[in-house]
Structures are given as C-alpha cells and as structure tokens.
C-alpha cells in the first residue's frame, strides 16, 4: 500500500493504561458474546457513547409525546396537577393494630 493511501485510511489509536483486571475480563466476555474481538468491542462502546452525546437531551414528557405522536388523538389531554384521585389509607384503626390482631 502506498504512503498516500495509508495517510487517507489512517485511524487514530488510543492506549488505555491501568485498566482494572475485572474490567478487562468483562470486556472480553462482552466481546465474545457479540462475536468480535475485544478491540472491536471497545470501538463499538466508544462509538455508542459519543453518538448519545450528539443527540439533544429531551425531557421525559417530550419523549413520551414523541412516541405517541400521530396515533390519531383528536382532543387535548387535560393536565391534572393537584387533583386528588384517592384518599390515603388510614392505618390507625383497631383492625390494623398488631397487638389486637386475630391469629
């Protein structure tokens, strides 16, 4: 391969020092599970990590709305902040007293 071709296809290299043995072992297992080398597994992990950073972060409500957008809902759903849907259970009665409980 000519030097000109090598320059066009040259990839960056990264050396990771002081990696805990347990991390290396888990990477090896993960690579075997996915059917490729540990080196390729690390590349895939790094690509995925960078990809997620490129995406704008959305709030939970926005993600839910996007998931269900276009399903045919014709009317708005009212917001129910501060509404009381159920009363809390009162556990102060005799039936809840462990000392007076029937066995």
Image (tube, rainbow, N blue to C red):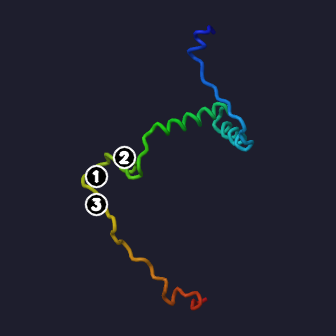
Label 3 vs 2, first from the N-terminus: 2
Label 2 sits on residue: 66
Where 98 sits versus 30, above or below? below
Per the model, the C-alpha gap separating discs 2 and 1 is 13 Å
The x, y position of residue 17, in whole percent, is 71, 35
Q: Secondary structure at mark 1?
A: loop
Where 94 sits versus 13, above or below? below
Quadrant where the N terminus lies?
Answer: top right
Q: Residue at x 45, y 79 (%)?
A: 89
Q: Kindly report which numbered mark, 2 or 1, lies closer to the viewer in this rendering.
A: 2
Q: Residues within 10 Å of mark 1 (few under 14, many from 20)?
A: few
Where 13 sits versus 68, above or below? above
Per the model, the C-alpha gap separating discs 3 and 1 is 13 Å
Image quadrant where residue 103 sits = bottom right
Q: Secondary structure at mark 2?
A: helix
Label 1 sits on residue: 73
The x, y position of residue 21, in whole percent, is 75, 42
Per the model, the C-alpha gap separating discs 3 and 2 is 17 Å
Residue at the top extreme, as displayed: 2
Q: Secondary structure at mark 3?
A: loop
Label 3 sits on residue: 78
Image quadrant where residue 46 sits = top right
Q: From the viewer's perspective, tell me whether residue 17 is left or right of residue 8.
A: right
Image quadrant where residue 40 sits = top right
Q: Kindly report which numbered mark, 3 or 1, lies closer to the viewer in this rendering.
A: 3
Q: Residue at x 70, y 38 (%)?
A: 28
Q: From the viewer's perspective, tell me whether residue 24 is left or right of residue 94.
A: right
Label 2 vs 1, first from the N-terminus: 2
């Amino acid at each position: 391969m000519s030097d000109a071709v090598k320059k066009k296809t040259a990839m960056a290299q990264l050396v990771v020092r002081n990696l805990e043995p347990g991390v290396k072992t888990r990477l090896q297992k993960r690579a075997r599970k996915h059917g490729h080398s540990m080196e390729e597994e690390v590349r895939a992990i790094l690509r995925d990590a960078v990809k997620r950073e490129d995406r704008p972060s959305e709030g939970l409500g926005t993600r839910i709305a996007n998931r269900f957008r276009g399903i045919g809902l014709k009317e708005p759903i009212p917001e129910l902040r501060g509404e009381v849907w159920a009363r809390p259970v009162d556990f102060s009665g005799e039936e809840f007293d462990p000392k007076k409980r029937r066995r």
